Amino acid sequence: MSQSLKERRTAKGLTQSDIAKLIGCSEQYYNMIENEKRIPSVKTAKEIGRVLNVEWVNFFKDKIN
C-alpha cells in the first residue's frame, strides 16, 4: 500500500505536508502511514481514500486475522 500512496500522491503533485493538511493530521503521522509504520484510524483512512482516490479498506486488508 505504501508505494501506491506515494505514487498517487506524487501523480497529483502533492507533498506529504499537503496531504497531512488536507486530511487533518501532522506531516509526521502521514509519513508513518505512507511508510507503513502506522495504521490509520478508520476516519483517517477514509480521508486519505477521499484525497488520493483509494479504497480506504485497503489499509486494513492485511491486518485482519
Image (tube, rainbow, N blue to C red):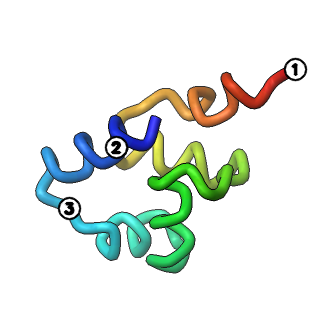
Q: How would you rate the neighbour count of disc 2 (Cα within 10 Å): few for under 14, some for 14-19, many for 20 or more?
A: many
Q: Identify residue type, mark 2.
A: Leu
| Residue 4 horizontal side relative to residue 13, left or right | right
Q: Identify residue type, mark 1.
A: Asn
Q: How many marks?
A: 3
Identify which residue is drawn at 69% across, 32% down: 60
For label 3, the residue is 14
Q: Earlier in the sequence, mark 2 or mark 3?
A: 3
Q: Secondary structure at mark 3?
A: loop
Circle nearer the viewer, 1 or 2: 1
Q: How would you rate the neighbour count of disc 1 (Cα within 10 Å): few for under 14, some for 14-19, many for 20 or more?
A: few
Q: Secondary structure at mark 2?
A: helix
Identify which residue is drawn at 41% across, 32% down: 54
Name above or below for residue 57 compared with residue 35. above
The image position of residue 23, as x and y in percent, is: 48, 64
Tell me the tag on residue 36.
Answer: none
For label 1, the residue is 65
Distance from disc 2 to disc 3, alpha carbons, whole Å, reads 10 Å
Q: Identify residue type, mark 3.
A: Leu
For label 2, the residue is 52
Distance from disc 1 to disc 2, alpha carbons, whole Å, reads 27 Å
